[in-house]
Image (cartoon, rainbow, N blue to C red):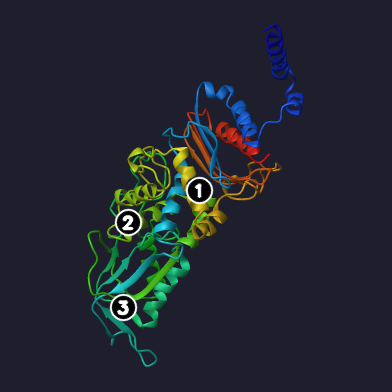
Amino acid sequence: MKKMIRLLSCRCVLLLTVVLMPSAQRAQTVTPQWGEALAFSLDSLLEAPMFQRSQVAILVYDLDGDSVVYDRGARQLMRPASVMKVLTATTALTELGADYSFRTTLAYDGIIEPDTLLSDSLHEWQVLRGDVYIKGGFDPLFNEDDMEAFVQSLRDRGIRCIDGRVYADLSFKDTLKWGEGWCWDDKEATLTPLLYKAKDVFMPRFLQALDADSIVRPAGYGRITGGSTADLSVLCERTHTIADMLTRMMKESDNLYAESLFYQLSAARQRATARLSAEREYALMRQIGLNPDAYTVADGSGLSLYNYLTPQLVVKLLRYVWTSPTIMATLYPVLPVAGVDGTLKKRMKGTRAEGNVHAKTGTLSKVSTLAGYATAGNGTHLAFCIFNQGVLNSQEGRDFQDRVCLQLVK
């Protein structure tokens, strides 16, 4: 009995010695497994004073071992901010594919015939006796080259006069100009299906382009919101693919690009609405094994205050992408890279995380988020998600996330 007491006493003394000795010396005495060491370091970070007044949820996942490495509140519903774009992009690549095209179409009805008033000995000009329609496809990449192609299509047919009306066909999507749950002072671009250089100035610019080419046209233009006119003849169609626009959407976190992609999810079936597009994202949640009733999707960019996701959902998405080679080949290269480009260009520079962490950032008032991929020092491939809510300022959240990433890549 005395021998057993002495043995227990020795073990207690040894344990106290290990706990009380300096951390550097303790690391030499105790050699925990890699996952345990990472968990210990992350637990230490969570002792920071900021967490006495703010919330955090973290999930770190070992993609090679298909297992959770660290979980702190990963099932808590929180606002994802622009990490929402990971869900939007993944759903679009799953449902539509990288080659899906945003389309803006110039068409007409009526007839094209010689114009005796404008024609001369050198040219037989044509007059379009009918109406011109421009059907928007919510393409944020439509630019001056595309506009020139529209005018050139009229020029190629010899049309120098439009004897009818010009219509903006806005029937692609609902008539809402902003997203549900957006703040009035966000100053975001209008969600219109007709965009020129990502701005709601398409029709004035089109009429100016006609004037610059000396094409006689009506004084103004009309709008169609409820449905397109049937049996139109197409003069020109300009397209851009999802792959074309993902870089700006993800690297620079462009909200308009994300919303345009979000609306494509339901436009492929019928007139686009935010509710129908959200249903497609809920369907993907169900596909990866989660109950969509447990989450709220209000928009595609993460601007809405009504969006609620969890780190668990985001990491499951990242794992789904990791195991889908075609989607991974498109999405991974457009994620910001720590210390290199996009919204992570100035973060983690000069550390082991530089060039290693590929992740989507997110920022709203009092909200900061980060989710993506990293490779640990031992070669383990990780997916991670960090949601900070109620932070004093965005920098406070970003600094904490950077410290987490530095621990991931040690």
* Three-letter code, disc 3: Cys
Crowding at dot 2, Cα within 10 Å, few <14 / some 14-19 / many 20+, comes out as: many
Crowding at mark 1 (Cα within 10 Å: few <14, some 14-19, many 20+): many
Amino acid type assigned to the residue bearing label 1 in the image: Arg
Q: Is residue 233 above or below residue 402?
A: below
Relative to 55, 110 lies left or right: left
Residue 83 seen in render? no
- In space, the residues marked 3 and 2 are separated at their CA atoms by 37 Å
Q: Quadrant of residue 181?
A: top left
Q: Residue at x 64, y 30 (%)?
A: 41
Location of residue 100 in the rendering, given as x and y in whole percent from the top left corner: 42, 64
The quadrant of the picture occupied by the C terminus is top right
State the residue lying farthest toward the front: 1
Please name the residue that numbered disc 1 is placed on: 319
In which quadrant of the rendered view does residue 332 lie?
bottom right
Proximity of marks 1 and 3: CB atoms separated by less than 8 Å: no
N-term-proximal mark, 3 vs 2: 3
Q: CA distance from mark 1 to mark 3?
A: 57 Å
Query: Relative to 226, does residue 390 appear above or below in the rendering?
Result: above
Q: Is 352 placed above or below 234 here?
A: above
Q: Within 10 Å of the Cα at label 3, are there few (<14), some (14-19), or many (20+) other Cα atoms?
A: many
Say which of 389 and 319 sits in front.
Answer: 319
Left or right? Give the position of 293 relative to 329.
Answer: left
Q: Quadrant of the N terminus?
A: top right
Tell us which disc is closer to us: 1 or 3: 1
Outermost residue on the top side: it is 2
Residue 105 seen by the camera: yes
Q: Nearer the viewer, residue 26 or 389?
A: 26
Query: Would you name the residue on which mark 2 appears?
Result: 266
- The residue that disc 3 covers is 161
Do residues under tags 2 and 1 come within 8 Å of each other at their CB atoms? no
